[in-house]
Amino acid sequence: MPSFFDSVQPSVGRLAFLSLCFFLFFFGFSSAISVMQVPAVDANGKGILTTIQADVRNGSGAVYIDVEPFISVETQNSAKMAAQQAAKAAGFDLARHDVFFKIVANTEVVDGPSGGQALALLAYSEFTGKPLRSDLTATGTIEADSSIGKVGGILEKVEASQQGGIRLVLVPLGQAVQNGVDLSQYAQARWGMQIVEVKNLSESISLAFTPNGSRVDSPAHVEPPLVLENVASLQSNRVLPLKGLAENQTAQLRRMLLKLDPNSVMAQVVRQGINRSDQLVINGYYYSAANEAFLAQIQTDAYFLSNVSKSELLQRVTALEAELDAYRFFEPTETSLAWSAGARLRWFWAKERLADVRQRAEVSERALPLLQDYAASANWLSAAKQLDEIARAQGGTPVPMATWKSYAVEQVRTANQSITANPLDSESLFHLKAAQRAYAAGDYLAAAYDAAFATAFNQARVQLGDWKEGQLDAVLPKSGRLGEYSDRVWAQVYYAHALYSAGQANVSGDLLDVVNAVKLEGLSKALAQVDADLVRRIGQPIATDEATATDGIQVTTTVQPAANNSWLLLGAAAVLIALVLLAFLMVYARRPKDLTNVQRLNLLEQGLLEGRISEKTYDKLNRKYGGDASTRPKAKPVRKRHP
């Protein structure tokens, strides 16, 4: 479908662009005194350096952000969290001041929370009046407990930093090793650059204000050993096939270890994965064990592919796409339902991730940034095949996929509404996209399950929105509840996985471990309900509606104009004038492209499902465009628009 801007006359588009440029120039100007070059990854997968400025003025505790060329909800939330945590660390009264950030990037998109650590350091510099060292940069999210969270594109960001003359890069704990390479050693030997892992904002602050050009001592990170309760006896025998899968995955890792230099960083990563997986199997955390081995396998595969060219990677992508398309699943039965769902989910995860790899590979200059995602797709397909074999072994009478069509629509729509209302979790969006892909392919079993992932993960983020330190025990799952899911395979294993994450949270105290535990606990509850609902629909009359579950997601963000500053009031007036002009140009000078009748009918169906048109209007237009009124889906009540 053509986008809005596709239908605007070229001359109007240029005028609209000039109006926006006027708005950004007038409103974005400020006399920031704290500046940092911050690495990012652009839409083409290339590392770049952005410039971030910070300024603090008298105000009422607001945080404003001006991003050229794009802003998102995650960027806004990250800026607010950064200012709050920096004020806490500095003992600064944020309620009586406003913070202004300006981010300028030579790229299409500046998005996500990965600049949180840098924003916090800039705000701290403003609050305390201390100058940051000019050869410093930082990447990582900032969380509500001031911990620094993991981000993607570390290798690309380090390379961009080197090109910009940076000599000290602060990265999240556990991310100095990428694709089997210890960047702290590599960068030091090749560029004389220090890569230092930090766990929280306090550690970042201790390093960020040292003299320019000086070497720093890396913080010591020694955590007590993880002690896990043995939950093997608390689970039913239904989950035992997953134990075998975990043991097979670990055996494969052992074979890979024989191909590695025993003294290499990659060999160390693999040994850690094997040892952790073995420990988890012994204690009954079968999914967690398989997942640890899975993650180590992805890193190992990416390591062995590190020398492939971009053209070779695209050939591998094409071959994997063909292998995915050629695979045929065992038809689900009531007894194999959970295993069939698990297999199909991973097939669609592989499909979704591989589509992203191909899209990025078309514009990326190198293959290296895409290798882990490619390896993840390949390993998801492998897992899908193994789970499908488990499903085959269960036997039973096949259930028509159409049995779950209407239920899949409900689940995907619920997930869509949850994410649109509170777009707080990027993992949720991935699962929603995969659910929509599954629905479009007619796999309503996978669509219903993946939509449950999306909703549960996003709701967990909403639940943790007001989380405060000291509430750890109150929000973490307890082992006593594991038995509640004894008749539901995936609810059981994901709850056990939540207990594993809870154990990690108790050791680290990091919010990200808390988030994972709460998300997984919510997922267990959601999957238990979905499993029961799907079983209940077996044998019932199959609905004949043609509902669609691929509703688009649109998130609207706003940046409030600051009060108490006359120049900002003038800026607000300029904003209003620019936006009114832009709206006039866009509304009155549109030149829409013609749609086919099939496209019109699809839009009518979507409008009916979303409650934007009545059944009477639908029937009238459906006849006009040659549709079949007997296929009309069940409509929502038409929503009244409020001023």
Image: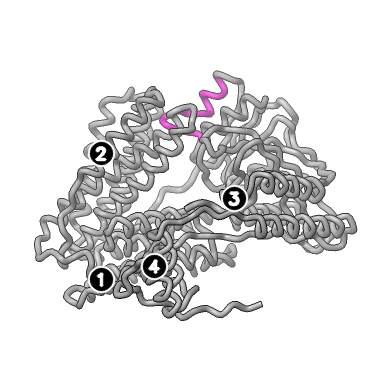
Q: Which residue is mark 3?
A: 5
387 left or right, relative to 583: left
Picture colour scheme: one colour
Please give the name of the residue rendered at 63% of the width and 48% of the height, measured from the top-left corner: 9
- Element class at badge 2: helix
Image coords of residue 162 (percent x, y): 61, 25
Q: Amino acid at mark 4?
A: Lys
Cα distance between the residues tagged 1 and 4: 27 Å
Residue range in magenta is 176-189
Q: What is the quadrant of residue 121 in the picture?
A: top right
Q: Write down the quadrant of residue 284 in the picture.
A: bottom left
Distance of label 2 from label 4 (alpha carbons): 44 Å
Which SS class for mark 1?
helix
Closer to the camera, 514 or 23?
A: 23
Give the alpha-carbon distance from disc 3 to disc 2, as whole Å.
35 Å
The answer to which of marks 3 and 1 sits earlier in the sequence is 3
* Residue 606 belongs to magenta span: no
Q: Is residue 609 left or right of residue 93?
A: left
Residue beneath the point at 59% across and 67% down: 466
Q: Secondary structure at mark 3?
A: helix
Residue 260 placement: quadrant? top left
Decide which of tag 2 and tag 4 comes sooner along the chain. 2
Q: Kindly identify which residue carries mark 1.
A: 534
In terms of sequence position, does the residue under pointer 4 or pointer 3 come before the other?
3
User: Circle 2 sits on which residue?
Assistant: 322
Q: Which structural element holds mark 4?
A: loop
Circle 1 packing at 10 Å, graded few (<14), some (14-19), many (20+), is some
In percent of width and height, residue 269 lies at: 38, 35
Name the mark nearer the viewer: 3 or 2.
Answer: 3
Disc 2 or disc 4, which is closer to the eye? 2
Residue at image x 31%, y 34%?
Answer: 318
